[in-house]
Image: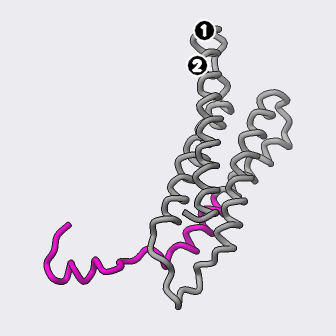
C-alpha cells in the first residue's frame, strides 16, 4: 500500500471518528436534553460521514486495487491524485467547520463558504475519477470471459 492510499484511508477513518462523535452529540442533544438538532449540524454530520469517510475510503481502496495505468494513459497522474486528496480533505473539513460556525453565528458570508466547499468537493471527485478512468478496465478477465468462464 503506497503513501497516497494510506492518506485516503487514514483520513477516511479520522472523518468517521469525528462524524461518530458528532452523531453522539446530536443524540444526546435530542434524546437526553430534548433540545433538538439544527439542520446544519445534520448536514455537517452527513457530509463528514458520507463524503469524508465513505467516499474517501472508496477512493483510497480504488486507488490501491485498480489495475496499474496503461503506458499510454495520459489521464492518470499521481500528482493529480495527491492534489485531489488534499482538495477533498480541505473542502470536507472546511465545510464541516463552516456549517458549525453557521449554527453559532448565522452570518450570511458563511453560506457562501459552505457552497464553495461543496463545489470543491464535487470538483475533487471529478478530477479523481477523470484521472482514474483509464484504470477501470479488465486485466485478463475479458480473455477468460471469451472462453466461456463465468464469475
- Say whether marks 1 and 2 touch (CB < 8 Å): yes
Q: Residue 34, image x and y in percent? A: 62, 9
Picture coordinates of residue 114 (x, y %)?
75, 46
Based on the picture, tell me whether residue 130 belongs to the magenta stretch: yes
Q: Residue at x 76, y 46 (%)?
A: 94
Structural distance between the alpha carbons of marks 1 and 2 = 8 Å
Asked if 110 appears above or below 7 in the picture, the reply is above
**Residue at the outermost bottom position:** 72
Q: Residue furthest left?
A: 148
Range of the magenta residues?
A: 122-151
| Label 1 element class | loop
Residue at image point 35% right, 77% down = 138
Which residue is pictured at 50% across the width and 55% down the height? Answer: 58
Query: Pointer 2: residues within 10 angstroms few (<14), some, or many (20+)?
Result: some
The structure's colour scheme is one colour
The residue identified by callout 1 is: 32
Mark positioned earlier in the residue sequence (1 or 2)? 2
Q: Main secondary structure of the magenta part?
A: helix
- Residue 146's x, y, as percent? 19, 83
Lateral position of residue 138 relative to residue 84, left or right: left
The residue that appears at 67% across and 31% down in the rendered structure is 41
Is residue 144 shown in magenta? yes
- Say few, some or many: other residues with alpha carbon within 10 Å of mark 1 (under 14 / 14 to 19 / 20 or more): few
Q: Where is residue 150 in the image (x, y as percent from the top left)?
A: 17, 70
Which residue was labeled with disc 2? 27
> In this rendering, would 11 be left or right of 142?
right
**Could you say which is closer to the camera, residue 37 or residue 14?**
14
Q: In which quarter of the image is residue 128?
A: bottom right
- Mark 2 residue element: helix
Amino acid at each position: 500500500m503506497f503513501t497516497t492510499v494510506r492518506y485516503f484511508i487514514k483520513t477516511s477513518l479520522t472523518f468517521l471518528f469525528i462524524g461518530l462523535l458528532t452523531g453522539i452529540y446530536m443524540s444526546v442533544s435530542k434524546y437526553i436534553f430534548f433540545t433538538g438538532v439544527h439542520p446544519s449540524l445534520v448536514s455537517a454530520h452527513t457530509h463528514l460521514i458520507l463524503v469524508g469517510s465513505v467516499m474517501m475510503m472508496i477512493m483510497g481502496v480504488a486507488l490501491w486495487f485498480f489495475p496499474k495505468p496503461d503506458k499510454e494513459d495520459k489521464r492518470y497522474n499521481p500528482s493529480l491524485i495527491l492534489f485531489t486528496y488534499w482538495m477533498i480533505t480541505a473542502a470536507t473539513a472546511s465545510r464541516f467547520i463552516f456549517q458549525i460556525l453557521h449554527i453559532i453565528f448565522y452570518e450570511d458570508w458563511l453560506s457562501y463558504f459552505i457552497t464553495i466547499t461543496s463545489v470543491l468537493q464535487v470538483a475533487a471527485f471529478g478530477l479523481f475519477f477523470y484521472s482514474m478512468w483509464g484504470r477501470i478496465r479488465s486485466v485478463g478477465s475479458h480473455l477468460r470471459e471469451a472462453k466461456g468462464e463465468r464469475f
